[in-house]
Image (cartoon, rainbow, N blue to C red):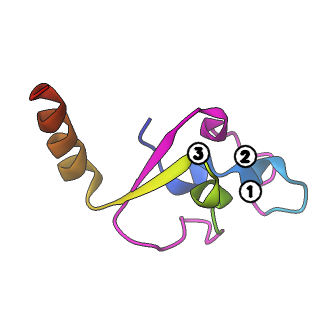
Amino acid sequence: MIGANDTVNPAAHRQGSPLFGMPILDVEQAKNVIVLKRGQGKGFAGIENDLFYRDNTRMLYGDAQETVGKLVQAVKKF
């Protein structure tokens, strides 16, 4: 899944969060999550994404389109 920062932010489930009630993709329930980001900035809403700090999440920095292309090419070599 590749999506915007706020659309995968579990804070949308917490009352009191500015994102509360916003529909999100519950990727935090996945066994493994790889987050593609250009940098360490916050999403459009300016809310820190606690998904990034969970044990099942790994960060992969770089342009998503370019990075996914490199990943696909690497997997094709297997």
Q: How many residues crowd mark 3 within 10 Å: few (<14), some (14–19), many (20+)?
A: some
Quadrant for the N terminus, please: top left
Which mark, residue 19?
1
Q: Nearer the viewer, mark 1 or mark 3?
A: 3
Query: Can you give x and y, in whole percent of width and height, for residue 21 in the image?
Result: 80, 46
How packed mark 1 is, by other alpha carbons closer than 10 Å (few <14, some 14-19, many 20 or more), is: some
Residue 77 left/right relative to 67? left
Residue at image x 57%, y 58%?
52
In the image, the segment drawn in magenta is 18-47
Residue 9 seen in this snapshot = yes
Q: Position of residue 49 (x, y in %)?
A: 63, 61
Label drawn at residue 56: 3
Most extreme residue toward the front, as rendered? 78
Please state, as top left, top right, bottom left or bottom right, where the C terminus lies in the image.
Answer: top left
Q: Amino acid at mark 1?
A: Leu
Query: Is disc 2 surrounded by few (<14), some (14 to 19) or many (20+) residues within 10 Å?
Result: some
Q: Is residue 1 above or below residue 5?
A: above
Q: CB of mark 1 within 8 Å of CB of mark 2? A: yes
Identify the residue under disc 2.
22
Query: Residue 4: x percent and y percent?
Result: 48, 51
Identify the amino acid type marked 2.
Answer: Met
Task: Determine the residue positioned at 47% across, 53% down.
Answer: 58
Residue at 54% over, 65% down? 44
Q: First in sequence: mark 2 or mark 3?
A: 2
Q: Is residue 56 left or right of residue 18?
A: left
